[in-house]
Amino acid sequence: MSNKVKTTKMNQSKQELVPKLRFPEFNDDGEWRIEELGSVCDVRDGTHDSPQFYNTGKPLITSKNLLSNGVMDLDNVSFISEEDYEKINKRSKVNIGDIVFGMIGTIGNPVLVKDSGFAIKNVALIKQKTDLLNSYLVHFLDSQYIIERFKTLHTGNTQKFIALGQIRKLSFPLPKKQEQQKIADCLSSIDDLITAESKKLEFIKNHKKGLMQNLFPPEGKTIPNFRFPEFKGDGEWEKLTLSDVYSFKVTNSFSREKLNYENGLVKNIHYGDIHTKFSTLFDITKESVPFVNLSQEIANIKTDNYCIEGDIILADASEDMNDIGKSIEIVNLNNEKLLSGLHTLLARQKKNRLKVGFGGYLFKSQCIRSQIQKEAQGAKVLGISATRLSNIKIIFPKKKQEQQKIANCLSSIDDLITAQIKKIDMLKKHKKGLMQQIFPSPDDQINHQSK
């Protein structure tokens, strides 16, 4: 980055309100001042009414539409009539350059408005006044200091909310306008990098989605839309029932309270981790997996029920149809002992028909996923059983060389996705660390004045 900041020399005899890092040209500009938000901004909120929603109309923004990366989600909005839109805008018209952030449910997530034409409900609206730049303020409102302040200020048991009066009384540090602009430009440049890398991540994910749709045959077909050249003359894929290929092994029902991340002899797959964090191809050396507590009795677990490489583990319960039967394939155990646990199904090949690494992607293919979803039962919580899964159709190339080629192709894309996620996380951590240094805490001056 071209913007340079350096450590500020602190006056040892007096705790001045200055940042730990400051752009050199502002080192002689003295202390920042503390202001209350309501004294330097026009702070109001949107409607509290519940207007009727329509399939089309004017967008109504609520907290759910404010994302943590400073972006407004306009793909999941409700629409209201022109009449209700005009009524709300008489009180709280949103203009380009305003800041909006959540007051109910999701607290915070400030967004600097770049396109208007929407109304707001239960969302705070900050309009720029005096010598305060909203392009600076939006970053401070997203700082760790404000996030922690919101945690102490919000009320409500079932749904979090923060009152408009509390927002108006929020204290924040304010430098001169030129320094505000420099800080805003610096942090916005990092945001632009994060946005660009996030778009690249979405492109890679969409590329993988397209490959999955074409490398595996659509439901009812026996040949994929795309085939590597060396296998084009190999004819149809083999089609069998799941029970022809896999048998199910016994799993355990250890709850989270019976697991720990510090020590143990045996690790355990919990269905929640399949839903939230484990990779399609499960390598135990790359995953954070809990141990079974040493106090738990495991002596009666048969050797055959411990996981081996090539096993498929499925989550048999979910509140979401998209996640029911979500699965992983064990590809590397590193000679460690692993069990399949609460709300999981453990499937093991009978005759080693599938190459290790191929099965994980096969079970993520649309053909298999749609069949699993059809077998799910339940209302609020969906469930599947080994019995219901046994008759679904499994289709795969007869040659293991083709299976390996498909697995290699998709795993290389997964490696790109993992690397891209790490890159974005590093940028976010860099921004967070910079913000902690570039903004002085209002508490510093408050604490000093109270001494």
Image (cartoon, helix red, strand yellow):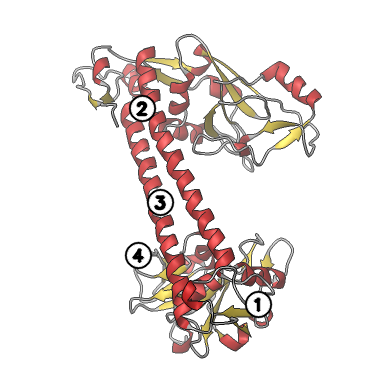
Q: Earlier in the sequence, mark 2 or mark 1?
A: 2
Q: Residues within 10 Å of mark 2 (few under 14, many from 20)?
A: some
* Residue 216 pos. (x, y %): 57, 71
The mark lying in front, picked from 1 and 3, is 3
> In the rendered view of the protein, which quadrant contains the N terminus?
top left
Q: Secondary structure at mark 3?
A: helix
Q: Specify the amino acid type for callout 2.
A: Cys
Q: Secondary structure at mark 4?
A: loop
Q: Specify the amino acid type for callout 3.
A: Gln
Q: Earlier in the sequence, mark 3 or mark 4?
A: 4
Q: Specify the amino acid type for callout 1.
A: Ser
> Which residue position holds label 4?
262
Q: Secondary structure at mark 1?
A: loop
Task: Give the Cα distance between marks 2 and 4.
Answer: 41 Å
> Which residue position holds label 2?
186
**Does residue 271 show up?**
yes
Task: Give the Cα distance between marks 3 and 4.
Answer: 29 Å
Q: Earlier in the sequence, mark 2 or mark 3?
A: 2
Q: Are marks 1 and 3 in contact (CB under 8 Å)?
A: no
* Residue 128 pos. (x, y %): 52, 15
> Which residue position holds label 1?
385
Q: Are marks 3 and 4 in contact (CB under 8 Å)?
A: no
Task: Give the Cα distance between marks 1 and 3.
Answer: 36 Å
> Which residue position holds label 3?
420
Q: Residues within 10 Å of mark 4 (few under 14, many from 20)?
A: few
Q: Earlier in the sequence, mark 4 or mark 1?
A: 4
Task: Give the Cα distance between marks 2 and 3.
Answer: 22 Å
- The part of the image, by quadrant, that contains residue 140 is top left
The mark lying in front, picked from 4 and 1, is 1
